Amino acid sequence: MDIEILEMSERKVSFILKDSTPAMANALRRTILTDIPKMAIDKVEFHLGPIMVDGREYESITPLFDEIIAHRLGMIPVPTDLKLFCKQSECSCGGEGCPSCTIMYSLNKIGPCTVYSGDLIPLGDPNLKVKDEFIPIVELADGQAVLIYTIATMGRAREHVKWQVANGVGYKYAPLISIDAKKCKHCEKCLNECPKHVFSGDTKKITIADPLKCTLCESCQTFCQPNAISVKADDRNFVFSFETDGSMTAETALNKAVELLSGQAMSLSGLVDNF
């Protein structure tokens, strides 16, 4: 099994999983979706009572219930460095919470204003500030204020979706497209009927311009009267793509998923050998 990268950016990746099986492709998809660990806000403490700012008293209240605000805070992508942090239950601190397993943020705003994710201030390393700074949390009216302290811990999406790193994780069979030059009459119907513009050419020659764009809809094959075009699905190669929420790069997420899947396979192999 090999991986060929087609596109790699900070938050998005597409690649070909080669010489594999549908079962392994789906296992990789599920690992990317549910098993990659990340940091997310898990505990939220709201200050109760009046808040004094520059001699003026503000009421610690918002138009939303505290539970809704806590949920929104939990869904904000928190920067995650897998080399720096570990799961709280596995930390040397015994689960009490330390800089190796938790990140603390404070949020202190007075109205009137819109409270955004960028208003979360990390207590410690400034590099842990949330990257997506304009995720709205709540609207404060004049005289209203919020003072919140939060704790982010590491988890996996199988426990709660707030720990889900990747979204839009999907794959398709790699297409196998061929043109029979002896049958092709260069009628250009395939050029017009293909919704993804896989083919290019003219009345002299038709070529396959970008086979990976093919969705296996077989429109070209249907409208090609002499049956010069053949479209099949390759069940040994798969075209993958996904995006991350910004908590980590797409490259880091992919490497971690492959590492986890490989470790699970080795563990299962060991159990079978010892049976």
Image (cartoon, rainbow, N blue to C red):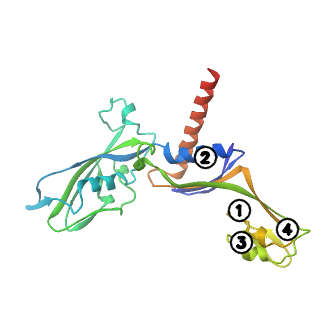
CA distance separating discs 4 and 1 = 16 Å
**Position of 218 compared to 130: left or right?**
right
- Confirm or deny contact between disc 1 and disc 2 (CB under 8 A): no
Instruction: Give amino acid for label 1.
Output: Leu
Q: Where does the image place residue 189, in percent across and percent down from the top left?
A: 78, 76
Neighbour class for label 1 at 10 Å: few (<14), some, many (≥20)? some
Q: Residue at x 67, y 69 (%)?
A: 196
Mark before the other along the chain sequence, 1 or 2: 2
- Confirm or deny contact between disc 4 and disc 1 (CB under 8 A): no
**Position of 141 compared to 183: left or right?**
left
- Say which quadrant the C terminus sits in: top right
Instruction: Give amino acid for label 2.
Output: Asn
Residue underneath mark 3: 194
Neighbour class for label 2 at 10 Å: few (<14), some, many (≥20)? few
**Position of 205 compared to 25: left or right?**
right
In the current view of this chain or complex, which residue is farthest to the right? 182
CA distance separating discs 3 and 4 = 15 Å
- Confirm or deny contact between disc 1 and disc 3 (CB under 8 A): no
> In this rendering, is residue 33 above or below 95?
below
- Confirm or deny contact between disc 2 and disc 3 (CB under 8 A): no
Residue underneath mark 1: 216
CA distance separating discs 2 and 4 = 33 Å
